[in-house]
Image (cartoon, rainbow, N blue to C red):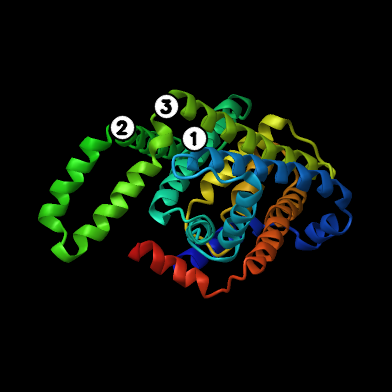
Amino acid sequence: MWIGVAISAVLLWYALKGLHLPEVWEHLRTARYGWLAPGVLVYFFGVWARTWRWHYMLRPFKSVSLWRLFPVVCIGYAGNNIYPARAGEVIRSYVLKQTEGIAMSGSLATVLVERIFDGLVMLMFVFIALPFAENIPSVYRVWVVAFSLLFGIALVLFVLVAAYPQIARRAYDVFERYLIPARFRPQLGGMVDRFLFGLSSLNNRRDVFMIFVTSIIIWLAETMKYWFVMHAFDFEVSFMVLMLMNGIVNLFTTLPAAPGYIGTFDAPGIKVLEIVGGVNGEVAAAYTLVLHAALWLPITLLGVWYFYRHRLHWSDFQRAEEAALEE
């Protein structure tokens, strides 16, 4: 957590250094905030698409209606925004187990698959937009190449494990025999079996295609929110620049950070607009801060409301961690 706070502080300093903060405040004060309304609507369409994707991936366990699954997704978003280390991913699997009886190890496998596809789509956005951004700093290009290798290797590994679960299970058996104490083997073996079952959506090419297409829709919807919020300020860049900004920003948010992705969202967002879009630094800072708040606040408020509606308590975050380890 403290490493994340330090990274956030450094990136915030980097993003805001050299800016005339009274001018940033003036742009914040005079923004046309009515444009946030359509942005929020299109963003929640993306959340609904994310719910459908998870519904699709959970089918091997149980068919959960979208109406029952949507609150769980919102609770997960709120957890990610409030707690460090994406704790919301664990709490949504915990809530799903409480409400639908789906094992956490299985649903967490689907969450990992979601993250891999999200990362691949972000990289696709960046690669599509890079030809329109010749002056992008080399550090961002290195970052993109590194993440391309990371997510590519992860996807290949997960697809192979899903395609050959028996080989993966035998490999785990060898690992278990020599490295896992006997008293832990039954519990861990059951978790591995449920995890492998959670990857079954990668067994079918049609399923993989549907997950990929849905992921594109999700992130295009979020980029549309970037576009709507842009109209609240006095600048204009192409949709490609916003795709590039969305891709790079979300790759940076995989770094450890303070809760709410403070700094890891703002610094790369401001710099992409400045360097690639040619936007005035003060305007870019005001836009990025408002965009960050517009992405963070509505889904967090809705998730917290659903959290209390499900009669959960903040101590459930700790119980979720314990349940994931003990299942």
Query: Where does residue 106 sit, x and y in percent of width and height?
Result: 40, 49
Residue that carries the numbered disc 2 in the rendered image: 160
- Residue 75 as seen in the image, left or right of residue 321: right
Q: Residues within 10 Å of mark 3 (few under 14, many from 20)?
A: few
- Residue 171 seen in the figure: yes
Q: Residue at x 56, y 46 (%)?
A: 64
From the image, tell me which residue sits under label 3. 204
Q: Neighbour class for label 2 at 10 Å: few (<14), some, many (≥20)? A: some
Residue tagged 1: 120
Answer with mark 2 or mark 3, whichever residue precedes in sequence: 2
Q: Measure the alpha-carbon separation of dots 2 and 3.
A: 12 Å
Q: Residue at x 60, y 59 (%)?
A: 75
Instruction: Name which residue type carries label 2.
Output: Leu
- Which is nearer the N-term, disc 3 or disc 1? 1
Asked which secondary structure carries label 3, the reply is loop
In front of the other: 241 or 319: 319
In which quarter of the view is residue 21 placed? Answer: bottom right
Left or right for 128, reference 85: right
Q: Residue furthest left?
A: 178
